């Protein structure tokens, strides 16, 4: 499938709540093509995840995958995961600081507070209902993509505006320290 244009912050579709997908249509060629487009676009952009509304599809669908990603060398691995109509629940009040970027907010990063323990119920690409319990650093990727479906981008959640920086500045001045922070989180909480 072709790589799609990624909508940028300020586009109206990124500010709206995405629509539910009729689960009876998950196996349809249309929905399967959306999934393929998302995977191809995410991989082409070296993203850790991407939501359907980021490529102009106003439905509650996102994909995530973390392998040897040059943008996120410190992130724990995650197999390709297709998430349709998710329902996310916070399992505790424990939080951590996540330094995040976004394909729809190019060349920017900032600190966001994320929950450490979540539960997500969703449908996969086959239409099977899944429930995942996610603890630790990987919980931020799930929350980041879930936020997109509600029209929320990471700049809306920034806890300190002084943490905004470019990708280049992050790589040069902050990535090593942040990687250590992630390592400590993974050591304590798991991926």
Image (cartoon, rainbow, N blue to C red):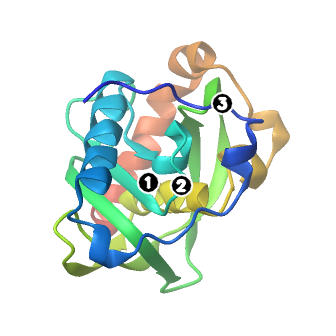
- Kindly report the distance in space between the C-alpha atoms of the residues bearing marks 1 and 2: 5 Å
Query: Would residue 133 be seen by someone viewing this image from the given angle?
Result: no
Q: Residues within 10 Å of mark 1 (few under 14, many from 20)?
A: many
Q: Quadrant of the C terminus?
A: bottom left
Answer with the quarter of the image where residue 72 lies: top left
Quick one: quadrant of the N terminus? top left
> What residue is pinned by disc 1?
141
Which residue carries the number 2 mark?
Answer: 144
Within-10-Å neighbours for mark 2: few <14, some 14–19, many 20+:
many
Question: What residue is rendered at 56% in x and 26% in y?
Answer: 174
Looking at the rendered image, the disc whose residue lies closer to the viewer, 2 or 3, is: 3
Q: What residue do we see at 39% from left, 25% from top? A: 71
Q: Position of residue 100 (x, y in %)?
A: 57, 41
Q: Nearer the viewer, residue 170 or 127?
A: 127
Q: Which residue is mark 3?
A: 8
Badge 2 element? helix
Left or right of 63 in this view: 126? left
Q: Position of residue 98 (x, y in %)?
A: 56, 50
Q: Position of residue 46 (x, y in %)?
A: 35, 26
Disc on res. 6 = none
* Residue toward you, 46 or 2: 2
């Amino acid at each position: 499938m072709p790589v799609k244009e990624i909508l940028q912050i300020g586009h109206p579709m990124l500010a709206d709540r995405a629509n539910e997908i009729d689960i009876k249509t998950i196996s349809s060629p249309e929905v399967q093509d959306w999934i393929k487009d998302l995977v191809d676009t995410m991989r082409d952009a070296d993203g850790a995840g991407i939501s359907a509304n980021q490529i102009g599809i106003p439905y509650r669908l996102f994909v995530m995958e973390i392998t040897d990603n040059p943008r996120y060398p410190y992130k724990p691995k995650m197999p390709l995961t297709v998430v349709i109509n998710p329902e996310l629940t916070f399992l505790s009040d424990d939080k951590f600081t996540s330094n995040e970027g976004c394909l729809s907010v190019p060349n920017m990063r900032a600190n966001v507070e994320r929950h450490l323990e979540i539960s997500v119920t969703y449908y996969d690409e086959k239409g099977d209902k899944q429930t995942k319990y996610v603890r630790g650093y990987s919980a931020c990727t799930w929350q980041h993509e879930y936020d997109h479906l509600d029209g929320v981008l990471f700049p809306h959640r920034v806890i300190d505006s002084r943490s905004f920086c470019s990708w280049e500045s992050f790589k040069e001045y902050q990535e090593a320290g942040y990687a250590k922070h992630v390592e400590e989180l993974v050591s304590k909480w798991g991926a």
